[in-house]
Image: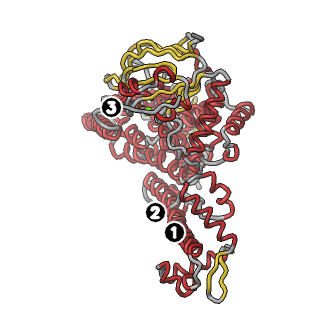
Amino acid sequence: MDNIAVKVDDLTVAYNYKPVLWDIDLEIPEGVLMAIVGPNGAGKSTLIKAILGILKPIAGSVTIYGNPYDKQRKLVAYVPQKGSVDWDFPTTALDVVMMGTYGSLGWIKRPKQKEKKAALEALEKVGMLAFKNRQISQLSGGQQQRIFLARALAQNASIYFMDEPFQGVDATTEIAIINILKELRKAGKTVIVVHHDLQTVPEYFDWVTFLNVKKIATGPVKDIFNDNNLTKTYGINYKVSIQK
Amino acid sequence: MNSAQIEIQLIASLVAIACAIPGTFLVLRKMAMISDAISHSILPGIVIGFFITQDLNSPLLIVLAALTGIITVVLVEYIQKTGLVKEDTAIGLVFPAMFSIGVIMIAKNANDIHLDVDAVLLGELAFAPFDRLEISGVDVGPKSLWIIGSILLVTITLLLAFFKELKVSTFDKGLAASLGFSPAIIHYGLMSVSSVTTVGAFDAVGAILVVALMIAPAATAYLLTTDLKKMLGLAIGFGALSAISGYWFAHWLDASIAGSITTMLGLLFLIVYLFAPSKGVIAVMYREKQQRTEVSLLTFLLHLKNHTEKRERHVNHLQEHINWQKVRAKTVLDLALKNNMITISNDIVSLTKKGNTFTSKAIDYIITNEDTQIEDMKEDFFLFRG
Ligand SMILES: Nc1ncnc2c1ncn2[C@@H]1O[C@H](COP(=O)(O)OP(=O)(O)O)[C@@H](O)[C@H]1O
Ligand SMILES: [Mg+2]
């Protein structure tokens, strides 16, 4: 196998001492476009947050290209769930995208022309340049999601973690987003997406991880995306017609 | 104006500005209640500090009291983390407990210290100019002016240095953490500034006004702008404006300065709340009325589009057919005419070409609910704005 981009060992994460992720082992190869699937409350968001050091696990470790996350921050971009922020916050689309460049700046230093240029380019890529000065609450759900994607692009990372980027977006936006993700993969980047629509998994992704408190399975979509794993993950008899 | 009057206004304005800066972030973080908690729970810190220093304006007292503020925040978070109660409940549990400890300490030692609860709650700005700071025998001004001035200077320095960090961690805690800006450090930094400011200000303006000065200017500014820097600027301006106008209001009424400033803050908020251009109550009501008219207009246009019979399109019959009250029918008719969407000949209404295209587009939008389609419509018509 090629390079391992993300490696998770024996990861256990708890809220108030109640574990919501048990003993997760996971290897994500470089250059895959991977879906994380599982029912609501399965711990998908928690897994991403633990990998990114936002939550402290009670056991286990995470490495990004062999080193702890703290050392590899600049290689990683993150798109949180859209609902996790207050869209009434007084700021513009461009400003939100600029936030993606803050990581490379570090503490105290302010964004300059270079960062602004990166943000404008990212806005252009997601087709939102015309909205750069729009207050973020004046954007539709799909546009807000594009802004979040642009912010991740502005980070210019190697690994992208996206928490439900298709939530509440229309079909056009969904296609636009998936095309950008596929382009990232083509450029050799690793993209990890929490995804809900099981029907589109084979069409969009080449790698998949089934998660429900424990890891059920991980691997190439063509090998492991089957009724057996779906049933194990969702607990009910699952039948999806997979177009190969 | 005599020098004492100028000094009082200066102190009040600096306090207001020093409060407005952390206040803006507290409001955006939906943590208004925590400033209430801090302002009340620093009381025991102030009393203990006073035992030790015997000086209400000593820097040590400020540090000790601010520490009590931080302890309050930590306690609130600890109780909340147990998952048994929500944040507001945790705040409600902690600060009355802290405050009452302070009250008991004052009562128990009433003979030794001249600190009374009234003064703590309401402050006494009028007396502030009497407590002077002397450096090697030279009077350099009121002590509270120097204290709040220093606090303000530190606050502004921190704001300029960490504006970007404050912004990103306030907007998106998860992103801030993933970028390496520890939200915990920023959170406790903000709590420390809030605590120190509260202690520095309370002597002059009292615990209640401190809360008002932190929250009201920021809440007022929030209604007026969609830009964080402007919001900070407006909050600072509103704070200072209330401080000065409040002073003169008190002067005129011969009333408490702190009370008058609070009244001004409330008044200012009320005015903005009613009249703010886009978020104000009146603007919202106006917009809703407009939208109702616009929906009626669309219904009317659709009716014209669907009915070719003359009978259905006669001006006098519109009412019966679309079931409107007279007034609204007239408004809608005028609106459609003004926008060249209809023509009327021999009392028969017909759609123009423009009206026809508009109706199809609007219906398309309503059915598909796709934003891309209305982007250009927003320009040439007002139906979907806002
Ligand atoms: N901040 C929190 N405090 C306590 N429990 C939480 C918190 N966030 C999530 N949980 C719980 O952890 C579990 C996993 O949540 P999450 O990772 O958000 O699931 P998913 O993203 O798969 O829907 C759920 O049972 C949820 O209720
Ligand atoms: Mg989730």
Residue with the mark numbered 2: B253
Three-letter amino acid code at the position of disc 2: Leu
Disc 2 within 8 angstroms of ligand 1 (CB): no
Q: Is residue A35 left or right of residue B69?
A: right
Q: Marks 3 and 2, Cα distance to the nearest angstrom?
A: 74 Å
Residue drawn at (56%, 69%) of the image: B298
In this rendering, the count of numbered labels is 3
Across and down, in percent, residue B191 comes to 46, 33
Across and down, in percent, residue B339 comes to 67, 73
Disc 3 within 8 angstroms of ligand 1 (CB): no
Please state, as top left, top right, bottom left or bottom right, where the C terminus of chain B lies in the image.
bottom right
Disc 1 within 8 angstroms of ligand 2 (CB): no
Q: Chain of mark 1?
A: B
Element type where label 1 sits in the image: helix
Q: Is residue B193 left or right of residue B118?
A: right
Residue contact between numbered discs 3 and 2, judged by CB atoms under 8 Å: no
Task: Say if labels 3 and 2 share a chain.
Answer: no
Q: Marks 1 and 3, Cα distance to the nearest angstrom?
A: 47 Å
Q: Chain of mark 2?
A: B
Q: Nearer the viewer, residue A130 or B336?
A: B336
Three-letter amino acid code at the position of disc 1: Arg
Q: Nearer the viewer, mark 1 or mark 2?
A: 1
Q: Residue A236 got which mark?
A: 3
Q: Within the displayed image, which quadrant is ligand 1 positioned in?
A: top left
Please state, as top left, top right, bottom left or bottom right, where the N terminus of chain B lies in the image.
bottom right
Q: Quadrant of residue A211?
A: top left
Q: Nearer the viewer, residue B243 or B303?
A: B303
Across and down, in percent, residue A99 comes to 62, 33
Task: Say if labels 1 and 3 share a chain.
Answer: no
